[in-house]
Image (cartoon, rainbow, N blue to C red):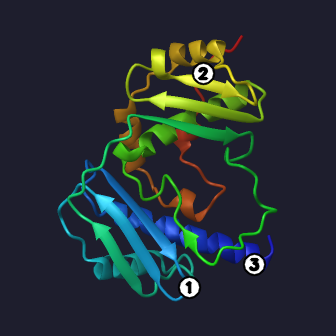
């Protein structure tokens, strides 16, 4: 990885990490979206949350530096502009669609595409509370890792919901416009869709590690379901 690409990756890791760090200071049951933008000379923290408890961003920034200063001197947040709105009415994400690719981390391989933007903004799911799609994302990713180990595909689209996945779960392979009913049936047979247990595992994990090191992933997200059988 060349120096420019490495610096870009560090900048993206910093905004993702800081958005998640701020999120962890807000009531876990709230609907919250926090976005952090690195504008070179300063950072903009923009967000909305249903929580009414106002955060001390300067104190949070000090805690962030104390926790991650040993990781890299580049993990430093400069001057900040606080644009967080409290007591907002946000609609929980009950159903979402995610796209995955047959790569090590299931993301699109963009390593050869330079980032020409003058700013770096934090990415979903970082800074998003469980009610705003984070739990659905990691559970969908869990399913995708399992399908990757059993089936050949280049691109996978998963529609997933908190409610009635017999009706709402849809899986599209590659460029197919019709959902794959055989895959859906296999998934429904052996996955519990117990989002509460999955959420607790995320809470109890070292959540920052996959942000700092792109080669890492939550073990339980990559855990293979031995009961999954595809015909």
Is 117 on the left-hand or right-hand side of 1?
left
Badge 2 marks a residue whose secondary structure is loop
The image quarter containing residue 7 is bottom right
Q: Residue at x 49, y 82 (%)?
A: 76
Q: Earlier in the sequence, mark 2 or mark 3?
A: 3
Is 113 on the left-hand or right-hand side of 170?
right
Say whether marks 2 and 1 touch (CB < 8 Å): no
Find residue 40 and name its label: 1
**Numbered disc in front, either 2 or 1:** 1
Say whether marks 3 and 1 touch (CB < 8 Å): no
Q: Earlier in the sequence, mark 2 or mark 1?
A: 1
Badge 3 marks a residue whose secondary structure is helix
Is 2 on the left-hand or right-hand side of 121?
right
The quadrant the C terminus occupies is top right
- Residue 20, given in percent of the width and then of the height, sits at 42, 62
Badge 1 marks a residue whose secondary structure is loop
Give the residue pinned by disc 3. 4
Is residue 131 or residue 207 the one in the foreground? 131
Give the residue pinned by disc 2. 226
Q: Earlier in the sequence, mark 3 or mark 1?
A: 3
Is residue 183 or residue 31 the one in the foreground? 31
Q: Residue at x 51, y 70 (%)?
A: 15
Binning the other alpha carbons within 10 Å of mark 3 as few (below 14), some (14 to 19) or many (20 upward) gives few
Give how far apart the Cα atoms at labels 2 and 1 are. Answer: 47 Å
Is residue 70 or residue 229 the one in the foreground? 229
């Amino acid at each position: 990885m060349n120096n420019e690409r490495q610096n870009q990756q560090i900048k993206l890791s910093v905004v993702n990490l800081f958005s998640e760090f701020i999120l962890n200071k807000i009531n876990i049951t709230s609907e919250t979206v926090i976005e952090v933008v690195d504008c070179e000379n300063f950072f903009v923290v923009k967000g909305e949350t249903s929580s009414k408890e106002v955060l001390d961003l300067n104190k949070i920034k000090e805690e962030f530096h104390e926790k991650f200063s040993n990781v890299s001197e580049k993990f430093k947040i400069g001057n900040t502009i606080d644009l967080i709105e409290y007591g907002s009415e946000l609609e929980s994400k009950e159903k979402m669609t995610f796209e995955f690719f047959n790569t090590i981390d299931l993301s699109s391989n963009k390593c050869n595409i330079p980032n020409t933007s003058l700013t770096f903004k934090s990415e979903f799911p970082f800074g998003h509370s469980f009610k705003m799609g984070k739990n659905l994302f990691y559970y969908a990713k869990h399913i995708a890792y399992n399908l990757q180990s059993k089936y050949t595909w280049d691109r996978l689209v998963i529609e997933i919901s908190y409610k009635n996945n017999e009706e709402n779960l849809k899986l599209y392979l590659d460029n197919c416009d019709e959902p794959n009913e055989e895959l859906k049936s296999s998934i429904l047979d052996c996955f519990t869709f117990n989002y509460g247990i999955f959420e607790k595992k995320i809470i109890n994990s070292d959540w920052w590690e996959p942000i700092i090191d792109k080669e890492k992933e939550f073990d339980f997200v990559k855990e293979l379901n031995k009961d999954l059988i595809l015909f």
